[in-house]
């Protein structure tokens, strides 16, 4: 095995054809970069979306004013829909016979939470909930208690915090302590079970407040509509509960039989399905475009190797005259083509690392100090494997051609 | 023809025909030769007489269209590409008119190359390559690349590369053709020494001055052996 010699030879030939080599290497780099970057984005998106889903419990459905995912130009239609309000929720609660588990919540982002000792970054999510929130949603308490019905209707100044906020209390128990969110003071009565973070999107950086006080002070100016979560009593009851909820909603909204729903209602599973379809589509697009780029780069490599074989015809003749068998010549050019691909892939990985690292720094300094850079080890392994496959796949024909050259013709080549 | 135990090369009635479209070019017709160990032969003849074709055949770079070729008793005319490569690697050293050194490799690496293909270990390769360079008087030029060497020095590197595998024959096609006459005579002095040390040398030339170094002169014309004579003027040993 004289692999090292062949690699050194490959590097030398890259050096002696700097411009042509760098263009080809660049195209390989772009292919690898495209796949790494797009699979990174897909990963982040999928995990973020599905973690939002994770809040909604089993056998549950969600009524929203507009769909979570919107495609195409239906924006106007959705925008003209009336808000969902706590009154609507009350109407549902009053009329539904298949369940009593109906919870209302709304979320608003970007608040600072202050304690006597410390203050958080302005990136805390504030969620207004009712007393059934913990029964309907897949969220539970680690310490303390939930809100009482009274606290919810009166809008008492009580709060439940996520575990990300614990450091604000300097190691003391947060229960019974005061926190301040935009001039309103609350007493902490509970701490949520830790949900963990997904690619920098922490699910624990939140404060739960009684719905009425939320609506008074924290409701988003653009979207005051609440979300209504309904839980069926069991798996078998899901479709009946779904049908009943749709019927009662239409009644509450006074819809005529020919009018379509002016709200969205989705089962937990259906939402999951939508997310899965979306992420599958992104994965397909990412791989198709990335593989397209790599194939284009592979053809570039093949051209480069064919030119290299042609230019070195005489050298091949000399090698054959000195006793190189076909497999030696094949091996030499294959190693050369793999080396070229790896160089390109390495460039792509470096580019991908540089871009994702700076993106991390940017997001960290502006929004998420807890964000830590994740080394895309899988992507690097992918790059090495893909580059080897491309190097062999597209280098084979030129190498085969070189190995079969007639030594006399090759020696005579000018 | 009776078989000679010291014969390295025995060719009998070989022909080489090139197809040029409709036309057939008879590069060699009915050539027979026997070459023994430690011979010093010059192949001569006008341009187009078939010298290079015969040389390629003797060097196992090509196979004859008809006739038989025995190399150390082995039938070469029916060998595969890879078998021929192995014979070339083990038994034949080539010296070309245009040197044919690898431009990006040092003198030492160039000389080492045939040993790479014979599968020798790195250390043995370097020892033997350095030894061969010493024999051609280039001890102090081992790390130089071809473009840092004079024409005569390049041809010395090429000769070192030809003898590093200790081959049965050294084939040189117009080895002095690209050198001035003085340097050419130096190179011929080197071939003389190799012959004295026991090597078998076959060289193609059209210069009488160069051919004079050989002990046997084979003249070709129109693809046939015109004469095959002892060289009375050969320098005495
Ligand atoms: N590859 C080839 N294809 C066709 N004709 C060839 C080829 N090689 C040599 N010839 C012809 O064979 C004859 C002998 O050529 P060559 O052996 O090169 O002669 P020399 O070396 O004595 O000048 C010439 O007529 C030449 O044109
Ligand atoms: Mg010739």
Image: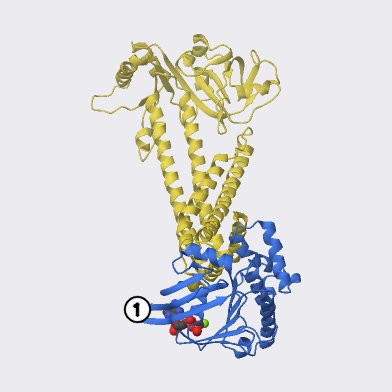
Chain colours: A yellow, B blue
Look at 33% across and 16% down and name the residue there: A241
The residue positioned farthest toward the front in the image shown: B2
Q: Position of residue B219 (x, y in %)?
A: 52, 87
Question: Can see residue B95?
Answer: no
Is A29 situated left or right of A74 in this image?
right
Q: Label 1, on which residue?
A: B21
Which quadrant of the view contains residue B136? bottom right
Q: Residue at x 56, y 44 (%)?
A: A380
Rendering quarter of residue B123: bottom right
Q: Nearer the viewer, residue B215 or B161?
A: B215
Q: Which picture quadrant has residue B89?
A: bottom right
| Residue A7 in the image, given as x and y percentages of width and height | 60, 57
Give how far across and how far down residue B32 sits, in percent: 47, 79
Q: Is residue B28 above or below residue B164?
A: below
For residue A192, above or below residue A303 = above
Q: Secondary structure at mark 1?
A: loop
Residue at mark 1: chain = B
Q: Nearer the viewer, residue A53 or A246?
A: A53
- A280 to the left or right of A192: left
Q: How many marks?
A: 1
In-front residue for pair B96/A231 = B96
**Which residue is situated farthest in the right direction here?**
B140
In the image, farthest residue toward the left:
A258
Estimate how packed mark 1 is, as few (under 14), some (14 to 19) or many (20 or more) residues with alpha carbons within 10 Å: few
Residue A291: x, y in percent? 44, 49
Residue B14 visible within the image: yes
Q: Nearer the viewer, residue A203 or B113?
A: B113
């Amino acid at each position: 095995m004289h692999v090292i010699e062949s690699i050194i030879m490959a590097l030398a030939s890259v050096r002696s054809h700097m411009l042509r080599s760098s263009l080809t290497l660049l195209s390989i780099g772009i292919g690898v970069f495209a796949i790494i970057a797009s699979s990174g984005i897909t990963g982040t998106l999928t995990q973020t979306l599905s973690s939002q889903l994770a809040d909604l419990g089993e056998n549950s459905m969600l009524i929203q004013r507009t769909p979570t995912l919107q495609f195409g130009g239906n924006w106007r239609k959705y925008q003209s829909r009336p808000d969902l309000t706590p009154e609507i929720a009350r109407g549902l609660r009053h009329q539904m016979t298949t369940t009593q588990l109906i919870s209302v919540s709304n979320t608003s982002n970007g608040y600072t939470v202050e304690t006597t000792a410390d203050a958080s970054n302005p990136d805390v999510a504030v969620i207004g909930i009712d007393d059934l929130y913990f029964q309907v949603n897949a969220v539970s308490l680690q310490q303390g208690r939930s809100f009482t019905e009274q606290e919810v209707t009166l809008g008492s100044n009580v709060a439940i915090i996520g575990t990300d906020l614990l450091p604000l209390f300097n190691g003391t128990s947060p229960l019974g302590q005061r926190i301040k969110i935009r001039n309103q003071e609350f007493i902490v009565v509970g701490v949520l079970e830790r949900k963990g973070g997904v690619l920098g999107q922490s699910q624990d950086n939140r404060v739960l407040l009684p719905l009425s006080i939320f609506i008074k002070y924290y409701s988003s100016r653009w979207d005051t509509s609440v979300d209504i979560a309904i839980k069926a009593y069991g798996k078998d009851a899901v479709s009946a509960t779904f049908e009943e909820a749709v019927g009662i909603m239409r009644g509450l909204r006074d819809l005529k039989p020919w009018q379509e729903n002016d709200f969205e209602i989705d089962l937990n599973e259906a939402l999951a399905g939508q997310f899965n379809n979306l992420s599958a589509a992104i994965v397909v697009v990412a791989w198709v475009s990335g593989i397209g780029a790599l194939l284009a780069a592979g053809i570039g490599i093949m051209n480069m190797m064919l030119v290299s074989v042609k230019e070195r015809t005489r050298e091949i003749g000399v090698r054959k005259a000195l006793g190189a068998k076909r497999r030696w010549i094949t091996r030499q050019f294959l190693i050369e083509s793999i080396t070229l691909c790896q160089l390109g892939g390495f460039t792509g990985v470096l580019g991908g690392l540089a871009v994702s690292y700076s993106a991390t720094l940017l997001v960290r300094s502006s929004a998420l100090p807890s964000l830590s850079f994740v080394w895309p080890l899988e992507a690097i392994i992918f790059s090495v494997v893909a580059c080897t496959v491309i190097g062999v796949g597209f280098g084979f024909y030129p190498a085969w051609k070189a190995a079969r050259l007639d030594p006399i013709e090759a020696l005579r080549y000018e | 023809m009776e078989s000679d135990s010291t014969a390295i090369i025995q060719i009998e009635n070989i022909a080489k025909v090139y197809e040029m479209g409709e036309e057939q070019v008879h590069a060699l017709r009915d050539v027979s030769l026997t070459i023994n160990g430690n011979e010093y032969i010059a192949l001569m003849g006008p341009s187009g007489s078939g010298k290079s074709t015969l040389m390629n055949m003797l060097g196992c770079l090509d196979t004859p269209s008809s006739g038989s070729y025995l190399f150390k008793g082995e039938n070469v005319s029916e060998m595969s590409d890879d078998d021929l490569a192995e014979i070339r690697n083990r038994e034949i050293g080539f010296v070309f008119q245009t040197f044919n050194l690898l431009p990006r490799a040092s003198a030492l690496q160039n000389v080492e190359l045939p040993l790479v293909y014979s599968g020798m270990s790195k250390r043995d390769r370097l020892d033997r390559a350095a030894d061969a360079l010493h024999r051609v008087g280039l001890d102090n030029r081992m790390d130089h690349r071809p473009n840092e060497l004079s024409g005569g020095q390049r041809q010395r590197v090429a000769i070192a590369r030809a003898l590093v595998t200790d081959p049965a024959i050294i084939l040189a096609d117009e080895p002095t053709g690209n050198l001035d006459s003085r340097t050419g005579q130096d190179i011929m002095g080197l071939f003389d020494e190799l012959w004295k040390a026991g090597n078998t040398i076959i060289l193609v030339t059209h210069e009488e001055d160069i051919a004079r170094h050989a002990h046997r002169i084979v003249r070709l014309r129109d693809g046939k052996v015109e004469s095959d004579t002892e060289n009375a003027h050969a320098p005495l040993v």
